């Protein structure tokens, strides 16, 4: 006999689409690279460390669960990076990269 789990969260379904990478830059910076476009922004490592410490610099925030770093681009678009991948980048600097996603609402 099966069972049913009902979600109590009323949020619209979202699809994450990989659009690029977060890679180590010169010095202590993260470069936001879009596939086919190139660099669209730079994030200082100090801003990421502040975010993980509970202080949200302009253009950066954590999701409610803390599993995703949300980066706001220059034109207001929002990109998502998994927190676990960003922590791995910092730990193994400059060897690791992280996937850069954009959220698309399903209709």
Image: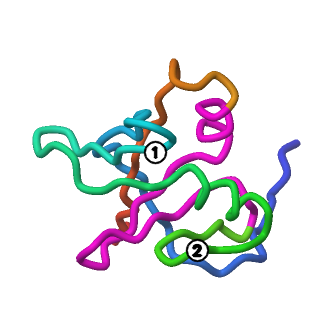
Residue 56 location, quadrant:
bottom right
Image position, residue 40 (x, y; %): 23, 55
Look at the picture and state if 41 lies above or below 63: above
Using residue 59 as the reference point, say whether residue 17 is left or right of it. left
Residue positioned most to the front: 27
Residue 73 belongs to the span the image colors magenta: yes
Toward the left, the furthest residue is 36
* Quadrant holding the N terminus: top right
Could you tell whether 14 is left or right of 49 in the image? left
| Residue at numbered disc 1 | 29
Judged from the image, the secondary structure of the residue bearing numbered disc 2 is loop
The structure residue drawn at horizontal position 31% and vertical position 72%, both measured from the top left corner, is 77
Q: Position of residue 50 (x, y in %)?
A: 70, 63
Which residue is rendered at x = 74% and y = 58% of the image? 52
Which contiguous range is marked in magenta? Answer: 65-90
Does residue 23 appear to the left or right of 90 in the view shown? left
In the depicted structure, whether residue 98 falls above or below residue 45: above
User: Label 2 neighbourhood size at 10 Å, few (<14), some (14-19), many (20+)?
Assistant: few
Q: Which residue is mark 2?
A: 57
């Amino acid at each position: 006999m099966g069972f049913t789990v009902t979600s109590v969260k009323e949020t619209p379904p979202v699809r994450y689409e990989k659009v690029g990478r977060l890679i180590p830059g010169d010095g202590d910076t993260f470069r936001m690279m879009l596939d086919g476009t190139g660099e669209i922004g730079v994030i200082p490592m100090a801003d990421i460390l502040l975010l993980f410490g509970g202080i949200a610099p302009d253009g950066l925030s954590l999701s409610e669960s803390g599993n995703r770093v949300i980066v706001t681009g220059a034109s207001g678009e929002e990109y998502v990076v998994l927190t676990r991948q960003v922590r791995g980048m910092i730990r193994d600097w400059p060897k690791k990269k992280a996937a850069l996603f954009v959220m698309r609402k399903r209709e």
